[in-house]
Amino acid sequence: MKVFIDPPNSMILFDLVERFGHEPLSSMAVIQEKVDNIEVDMPPMNVTLEDVIKGLKYAGIEVPSGIRGRLALWGPMIDAADAAIVIENPPFSFGCVGCDRSNELTKYLLQRRGIPMLTVAYPNDAEGAKSMVGQIKEFLDNLGKGAKA
Amino acid sequence: MSTARETRLLMISPDSNITPDVLARAVHTMAENLSVKETCYGCLVEADAEVMKTIISKVRADYRNEVFTKRRGYPAGDPRRCRAQHGTRPGFAQLEAEWECLPLIQHALDDIDAGNTSYSETVRKKPLPVSELKKICEEFQ
């Protein structure tokens, strides 16, 4: 099943979802599409008019362009996802997730879709890591069973 | 999605004994038609989607919970990202943050592999209600 990961560029989440037998939906794949097919200098920081229009489906015209730009990439993945895993409060410098409004809107869109969603915390110690990995494994295992039933 | 090229980033957990050189050499022998670039954290691998599947399953078999992977949007050595060409490296802070976390994840996965699947859910911190704060303040008066 397709699992949207948030932060969408997280290696830990990407690896765990793939390790436990599902397909992670991450920003890297959509960025590759732009790197390979579109002649812009610096994707995803440079966008095309198409992206701006696409972003309007997920965020209004009055919303800052950075949020709309991010959601132009993440929105179609949220639409395609069968489930989602969210890690709360990633470090501020964590790639492209420094914009809290984008993060709020992403979580809102995920909740509005009503797909199975797991929220976990970044681990600080061994116990926290065990809890995080255990919850993700259980969630993904049950996801497979739910699909077969 | 484009299937012609898949670039993967392989990162070694800090608790592992393998080195980027060992990993890069091992990955080179795993399949044909691939390119490998050794990096400070592990290596970058580039191949088509089918070959990449083989490589990842072999890496997971040989270095079960020691090597972690994710896709990369840019090809290896792309001038827009390559340090040698003064490219920007916006993903570095994120990689560093997750690299610090990897030993914890590695040991959690080792535990699960050993059959120890029990865990206790971490208690989420909630904001202190104003009434509670007021009570605490009054106690100190």
Image: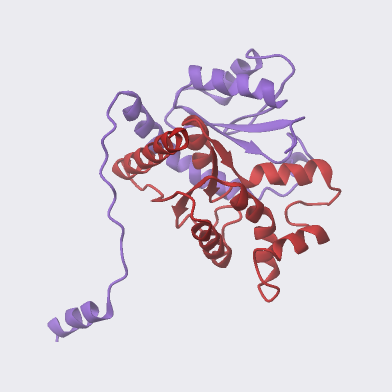
Chain colours: A red, B purple
Q: Is residue B124 above or below residue B42?
A: below
Locate the N terminus of chain B and report the quarter of the image it occupies: top right
Q: Is residue B38 above or below residue A101?
A: above
Residue B5 pos. (x, y %)? 75, 30
Locate the C terminus of chain B and report the quarter of the image it occupies: bottom left
A140, A146: nearer the viewer: A146
Instruction: Determine which quarter of the picture holds residue A139.
Output: top left
Residue B130 pos. (x, y %)? 27, 80
Q: Residue at point 27% right, 29% down?
A: B116
Q: Is residue B80 visible?
A: no
Across the whole image, how many numbered discs are drawn on residues? 0
Drawn side of residue B3 relative to residue A90, left or right: right
Drawn side of residue B85 relative to residue B139, left or right: right
Drawn side of residue A18 relative to residue B131, left or right: right
Q: Residue at point 63% right, 36% down?
A: B71
B19, B8: nearer the viewer: B8
Q: Is residue A88 above or below residue B45?
A: below
Q: Residue at point 73% right, 53% down?
A: A44
Residue B49 pos. (x, y %)? 69, 27
In the image as oriented, which residue stretches furthest toward the bottom? B141
Q: Is residue A29 visible?
A: yes
Drawn side of residue A53 relative to residue B29, left or right: right
B117, B108: nearer the viewer: B117
Residue B77 pos. (x, y %)? 76, 35
